[in-house]
Each structure stands twice: as structure tokens, then as C-alpha cells.
Image: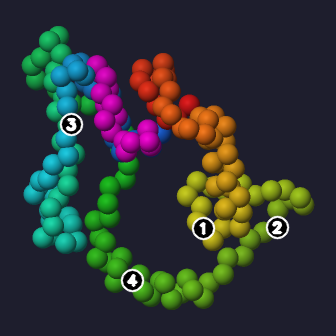
């Protein structure tokens, strides 16, 4: 978690560019007094396929700054999040086998591009895409070039903290 006086960004370590949640707060908080922890909760247990296992939860406690005490009309002035899990996953499982059979028989057909043009790989391209391995190698080379072979975190003055992304 990255907490500033008027924002919060939740992300997996090393993947700051794809936050799980990012928000501008409706008031100010004290980042040094705020905290986060991994815990479990029964609140969303009904959403799990196996309801007998613990429900991992990220608990974030934001401590309001002195000049922002009292009740805020809302917590976030603006908020962005990734799409949440499927609500109708059971229906998907029922249809998956039928679709899988159809996909095995289907073969993609594409229009021809410009002669000699190389193909861009889109984000999220699958292993089966032609040129996938070459694309991954180029991305790794680019990262190693920017960060050096040791990959140590460097101070990012724009973020105000150390980061692996330069």
C-alpha cells in the first residue's frame, strides 16, 4: 500500500503500474499513522467457491489528519479499481466444456497485413501467439537496460519513494 496525505494506492509489490485500487481521498490523512495488514474476514465468504477455507482480506486503516477530523461526506473524491471477480462463475463452469470443444475445432483466420511489417503483440497475448517468446525477451532486455542487471530499487522523486520501475 502507498498512502499519501490525500491518496491511496494498493498494489502487489513490484507491480506498482497496475494498482488493485487507486483513490484520491475526500480529506487528508496522516500517512505515518496509517497502516495495513493481511487478515481474514467472513464478510465475503459466500463469494468463494470453497466456503470452508479462510477468506484473505487486506485491511487498511487510514488515520485522519487533524485538519480533516470529523465525518467526511464520502471517503473517496475519486476512485479507480480493477473489475471484480465473476458473479456467475458457476454458469461459466457449466458452459466451459462445451465451449472448450468448440474452440479446439476453431482456427483463427486473419487478413494479410503490409508486406514486411512486423506484428505488435498486445498486452495479455497468449503463449500460442507467434513471436511471443521474442516479445518477452525484448521486454526483459528493455527492463535490464533501464535498471541494470542487479535490479535494485532506485529513488523515484516523482513517486517520493524507492521503486523498481524507472
* Residue range highlighted in magenta: 1-16
Disc 4 + disc 2, Cβ < 8 Å? no
Q: Is residue 2 magenta?
A: yes
Farthest residue in the right direction?
A: 115
Q: Which mark is residue 127?
A: 1
Badge nearest the viewer, 2 or 3: 3
With respect to residue 10, does 98 lie above or below?
A: below
Residue 159 position by quadrant? top left
Q: Tell me the CA gap for discs 2 and 3.
A: 52 Å
Q: Which residue is mark 2?
A: 112
Predominant SS of the magenta segment: loop
Label 1 or label 2, whichever comes before in sequence order: 2
* Residue contact between numbered discs 1 and 3, judged by CB atoms under 8 Å: no
SS class, disc 2: loop
The image shows residue 18, relative to residue 46, as above or below, that is above
Give me the C-alpha separation between circle 1 and circle 2.
Answer: 21 Å
**Which structural element holds mark 1?**
loop
Q: Earlier in the sequence, mark 4 or mark 2?
A: 4
The image position of residue 96, as x and y in percent, is: 41, 81
Kindly identify which numbered label has been placed on residue 95: 4
Q: Is residue 103 magenta?
A: no
Identify the image quadrant of the N terminus: top left
Label located before the other in sequence (3 or 4): 3
Q: Quadrant of residue 109?
A: bottom right
**Residue 65, horizontal then vertical, whole percent:** 18, 16
The answer to whether the residues at label 1 and label 2 have Cβ atoms under 8 Å apart is no
Image location (x, y in percent) of residue 114: 86, 59
Residue sitting at x 63%, y 71%: 128
Amino acid at each position: 500500500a502507498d498512502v499519501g496525505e490525500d491518496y491511496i494506492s494498493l498494489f502487489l509489490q513490484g507491480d506498482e503500474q497496475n494498482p488493485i485500487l487507486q483513490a484520491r481521498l475526500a480529506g487528508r490523512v496522516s500517512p505515518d499513522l496509517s497502516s495495513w495488514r493481511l487478515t481474514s474476514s467472513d464478510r465475503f465468504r459466500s463469494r468463494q467457491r470453497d466456503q470452508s477455507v479462510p477468506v484473505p482480506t487486506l485491511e487498511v486503516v487510514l488515520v485522519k489528519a487533524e485538519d480533516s477530523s470529523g465525518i467526511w461526506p464520502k471517503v473517496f473524491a475519486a476512485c479507480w479499481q480493477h473489475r471484480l471477480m465473476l458473479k456467475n462463475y458457476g454458469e461459466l463452469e457449466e458452459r466451459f466444456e462445451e465451449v472448450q470443444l468448440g474452440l479446439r475445432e476453431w482456427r483463427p483466420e486473419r487478413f494479410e497485413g503490409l508486406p514486411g511489417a512486423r506484428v505488435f503483440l498486445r498486452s495479455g497475448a497468449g503463449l500460442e501467439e507467434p513471436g511471443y517468446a521474442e516479445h518477452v525477451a525484448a521486454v526483459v532486455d528493455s527492463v535490464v537496460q533501464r535498471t541494470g542487471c542487479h535490479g535494485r530499487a532506485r529513488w523515484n522523486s516523482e513517486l517520493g519513494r524507492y521503486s523498481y520501475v524507472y
